[in-house]
Image (cartoon, rainbow, N blue to C red):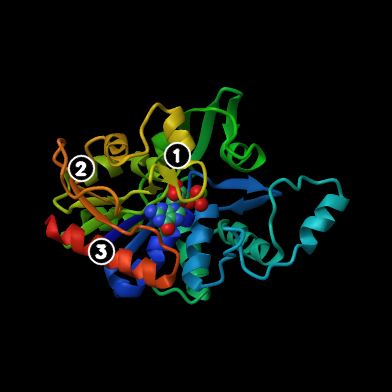
Amino acid sequence: MILALAGGVGGARLANGLVAVLPDDQLTIVVNTGDDSEHLGLSISPDLDTVCYTLAGINNLDQGWGIANESWSLMGAIERLGGDTWFRLGDQDVATHLMRTMMLRDAPLSAVTSFIAGRLGINHRIVPMSDDPVRSMIETDQGVLAFQDYFVRHPAEPRFLSIRLEGVECAKPSPALLDGLENPDLQAVIICPSNPVLSITPILAVGGVRERLMASSAPVVAVSPFIDGRAVKGPAAKIMIELGRATTTEGVIEYYDGLLDGILVHSEESRGLTAEGVAVWSCNTLMASDADQQRLARESLAFASSLR
Ligand code: GDP
Ligand code: CA
């Protein structure tokens, strides 16, 4: 079986390719929940929703988050009542948050997520990194900001100093993640081209995840989110640079600090083995279409299997 680690948009794109090429019992998609928050009394899990909406084919392509063909009546009514409107929630999207909030009273996030994914017609396993709450807090030159405050309210403008993961000391991996990590049939771990700092670091920080991946005989392969040193979308490059890191093949390898056996990078860069002994594979990593997503999924699986 294959474990894929994912954040939101970049993660969802490769995950969408992986579900097209792998049977549903051969893949577990593990999603970051460090971005989760409570807003207007609702439990919001942005990365889980982005992955679910993308795999269900109902994601909003123009916005890059939320559901396609949304209406915004609720936001208008909230504004009339003087509520916060900087964090925008579409009407259909709110249905997901209402269901999740209600169901979380009696069930862990893993069960709630699998129920929602099932109702959206998804057969593959999508699981949170943990059922315990972890909240990414961003230390910036303007003080400590809760994740959505940093990412949405101040669209990643303050200078990024570090990420603090509240609750991570007590967080256990979700049962399906633990199962994957301990599965003797684990064939490969694919780190999707998600934001390494905001989306992948929280997953690796959950109790024992990084250590188990380091110890695993399955190859760990990352797809770089950078093309020609730039992020395809979002602040990943800005954050890496603010951390004094490079948005290159070496920069990503160093950021993951000994975890990677291989890395897939965009075609202009070279193939071979780096000084650190990490295998480099190059191909077109831009996923503009479903066909691109499936091609990159196949390519990552073939690359990982060549490292076994
Ligand atoms: P977020 O939670 O929505 O910010 O999404 P992720 O962390 O999963 O993904 C953000 C990253 O995805 C950005 O750094 C982008 O560069 C990367 N990304 C998005 N689309 C693509 C793509 O088609 N190819 C590659 N290589 N990276 C992508
Ligand atoms: Ca996210």
Position above or below: 110 against 203: below
Q: Quadrant of residue 283?
A: bottom left
Position above or below: 219 against 295: above
Kind of residue indicated by mark 3: Glu
Give the percent coordinates (x, y) of residue 90: 69, 61
- Describe the element under mark 1 as helix, strand or loop: helix
* Nearer to us in this view, 112 or 139: 139
Nearer mark to the viewer, of 1 and 2: 1
Contact check, label 1 and label 2, Cβ < 8 Å: no
- Describe the element under mark 3 as helix, strand or loop: helix
Residue on which the image places disc 2? 214
Measuring 29% from the left and 38% from the top, which residue is drawn there? 256
Q: Quadrant of the C terminus?
A: bottom left
The residues bearing labels 3 and 2 have C-alpha atoms spaced at a distance of 22 Å
Position above or below: 112 against 267: below
Which mark sits nearer the N-terminus, 1 or 3? 1
User: Can you tell me whether the CB of the residue at mark 3 lies under 8 Å from the nearest atom of ligand 1?
Assistant: no
The residues bearing labels 1 and 3 have C-alpha atoms spaced at a distance of 24 Å
Dot 1, crowdedness within 10 Å: few (<14), some or many (≥20)?
Answer: many
Give the percent coordinates (x, y) of residue 304: 19, 58
* Nearer to us in this view, 284 or 307: 284
Give the percent coordinates (x, y) of residue 159: 54, 27
Kind of residue indicated by mark 1: Ala
Which mark sits nearer the N-terminus, 1 or 2? 2
Give the percent coordinates (x, y) of residue 40: 71, 49
- Quick check: can you spot residue 300? yes
Q: Which label number is shown at residue 299?
A: 3
Residue on which the image places disc 1? 237
Nearer mark to the viewer, of 3 and 2: 3
Measuring 36% from the left and 41% from the top, which residue is drawn there? 206
